[in-house]
Image (cartoon, grey):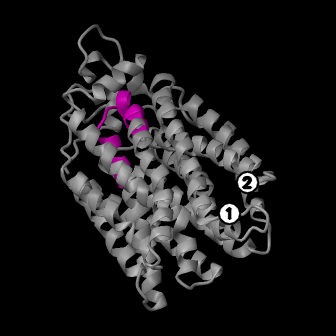
Amino acid sequence: MNSIPNASRSGPRPGPAVALGLVILCIEGYALFILGAVGPSLLAHPDWEVTKSTLGLLGGLTALGMLIGSIVAGWAGDVFGRRLPMTVSLAWLSVSMLLSATAGDLTLFAATRLLTGVGIGALFPLVIAYVSDAATPARHSLHVGTATTGLAIGGIITAVAGRTLLPGWDFRALFLFGIVPLLLVPVVYRIVPAMPQEQQLAPASLTDEPGPNTPARNSHKSQLRQLLGPMYRRSTLLFWAATFSGLVIVYGASTWLPALMVEAGYGLGTSLDFSIAFNIGAVVGTVGAALIADRGALKTATMVGFGLAAVAMIILSTPQPRVLLLLASAVAGFGALGTHALVNIYIAHSHPATLRGTALGFSLGVGRVGAIAGPSYVAAVTVLVSSSSAGFYAFVVPAVLGAVLIGLQRTPRRPTTATPASTRSEAPLTP
């Protein structure tokens, strides 16, 4: 899309938007990775009779909730603006986590993880769309990528909390952190605009729909029809499949990494050290890859990320010096969380603001099938294959598949009409 060099820069500024997005996704990362951190404690619970299959089911329920939240919130963000759905999602996540902290049995705990998943799934497309709305063209990948590192930072906080408090404390105490998203609600309501300016001004020429000048955001069916229409169909289907592959890795690893390390012979504290390295690698790798992507190599960076995930998991499956295993964990963190961030940056950068939330929401929603399948898939592999390396090899297939799918991607050619508001967030993308 062509931009207007001297257009005014109204609307949200990149700095505050990135900072707020990072904090919200940090909370989301904590809510996501906490299941992996407490996994060994759940398996050792004297009364709940948790098995590996049960742990996979809990991860699958979380992902099922995320599927629902992603689709509904992504669409709502394009129709009602980012502010209202974001505040509702934060409040929902807070209440759900506090319910997990008070769960008295496994059934109730499982129900709270389903509800928590709805909140997690809703926040991610809303935050990515909001930060992308505010991002400057030359630093689009860096701005969005920096915000998405909040997921990994939240994972680091979770691992540190687990290493410090478990197994001495009741694992449910870690869910009391759920009070924090509720405190952010008034901040979001004050900072996030009710409706991105590009959504207000978008003419009919920004869509492939014939008819009068009616913004695409007025119709859910119109938005989905555009994503599956001639202009976006190929990229939409490839993005959905790549997101599926990426989320098999992300949510399989978030649920199973500590337990796999324990099964491989490491203690709980040591396994959580690997989780910390995993998330540090995601933070550093995502920022570095985003800097490269802003130089026109987003497609290449994403493919390399998937490839590194496969290599890292193979190394983790073998006896190696501790330093090398920690380094491999860091690379795996980038290959999982960092690559997932790059896929979403690619999606955000490939669609106008009138479709961005819906494109992200549906891609994440369809991809959540991978998140649902991921923990159960790894659980099934570890049950069916007696080798302690089996769980690590289970991640190699989706990693290779993700690299192939991104390699087949072609950036859709968007219309050349632009509005002043769009010049801030839209820029040509060179894979």
The residue pinned by badge 1 equals: 50
Asked which secondary structure carries label 2, the reply is helix
Are the two marked residues, 1 and 2, in contact with CB atoms closer than 8 angstroms?
yes
Residue 288, picture quadrant? bottom left
Percent coordinates x, y for residue 324 in the rendering: 42, 86
Residue 162 against residue 344 in the figure, above or below? below
Query: Which residue: 26% across, 9% down?
Result: 211
Query: In the rendered structure, which amino acid carries the disc numbered 2?
Result: Leu
Check if residue 176 falls in the magenta segment. no
Range of the magenta residues?
A: 342-361
Magenta segment, principal secondary structure? helix
Q: x and y percent of residue 368 in the render?
A: 45, 46
Label 2 sits on residue? 106
Where residue 293 appears, x then y in whole percent? Answer: 28, 56
Locate residue 165 relative to residue 230 in the image: left or right.
right
Q: Residue at position x 58%, y 48% from top?
A: 61
Q: Is residue 349 magenta?
A: yes
- Residue at the top extreme? 212
Location of the N terminus by quadrant is top left
Task: Please tell me which residue is depicted at 28% across the width and 67% down the height of the picture.
Answer: 307
Local crowd size for mark 2, using a 10 Å CA cut-off: few (<14), some (14–19), many (≥20): some
